[in-house]
Amino acid sequence: MSERPSPTVGRRTGDPLQAFLQAVAFHQQGRLAEAERLYEIVLAADQRHFDALCRLGAIRIQQARFDDAARLFRRAIEVDGNSAEAHHHLAFALTGLQRLEEAVRHYERAVVIAPDFPEAHNNLGHALQMLGNLQQAISHYGDALAVKPDYAEARNNVGNALHLLERHDEAIAQYEMALAIRPNYAEAHWNIGNALRALHRPEEAVARYEQALAIRANYPEAHNSLGNALAELGRSEEAVSHYEQAIAISPEYADARINLDYLLRSMADSGE
């Protein structure tokens, strides 16, 4: 029996509309290499095809090719400067490039165009938080939650900003609210553990880190933090195991390597 040809645009790739429709289908199926090839065909025929620019830009973000993504979304904005989505995605790419002030400007443009855009408010808050503008960040997380009350990520982010402000009890309350929305939210459990450690409650922190790892076993940050809490409690051998697990999952994880080396030296000095 002869093999059936794979579904491609085939003879119709010369038709930008057909190429675009097939690209969207591939994109929705997760067949990104085929989708991007067809988006490029569309853009070769029409450099100002807004949807192809945005969709190819989204693929570039998925590939962490933030420079390419930013160029594509800039071109999209030249076509339609009033697209909140295009400004939002450009800002996301700029955040990936650590160009935070520029990212903030485009997130702000997105929420001016579309005030009820919770993801843009949340991501604007995150960029502001990275810049150290914690109160402004909290305000935008609040705007996101006003639009989307069940937005677990935004609730978790409020907690992160409060934690950085050393308002740890308030942070824990926000993380618990995030968990009420999404019970299997590993990051929220990890964050509660971090806040509990900041409050000098390492035994409770251990339980939270263990909950995070029960949800996501391959969570290097939680292994590292659990190692820290166990080391504080004098449970050195267990701490070593968790540092080693963090490194096995993420070999470039410098904090875990530093913590492991320090603990092993301390154990050697004390004769453990």
Image: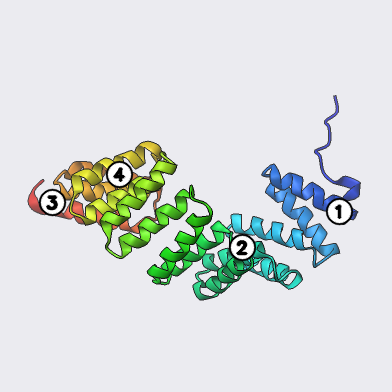
Colouring convention used in this rendered image of the protein: rainbow
| Residues marked 4 and 2 touching at CB (< 8 Å) | no
Q: Amino acid at mark 1?
A: Leu
Q: Earlier in the sequence, mark 4 or mark 2?
A: 2
Circle 3 or circle 2, nearest the eye: 2
Q: Earlier in the sequence, mark 2 or mark 1?
A: 1
| Residues marked 2 and 1 touching at CB (< 8 Å) | no
Q: Earlier in the sequence, mark 3 or mark 1?
A: 1
Residue sitting at x 77%, y 50%: 23
Q: In this rendering, does residue 247 appear at all?
A: no
Q: Which mark is residue 268?
A: 3
Q: Which quarter of the figure is the C terminus placed in? A: top left
Q: Earlier in the sequence, mark 1 or mark 4?
A: 1
Q: Please identify the quarter of the rendering in which residue 115 is found.
A: bottom right
Q: Amino acid at mark 3?
A: Ala
Q: Amino acid at mark 4?
A: Tyr
In the rendering, at what x and y percent does residue 147 appear? 53, 55
Element under disc 1: helix
Q: Which mark is residue 17?
A: 1
| Residues marked 1 and 4 touching at CB (< 8 Å) | no
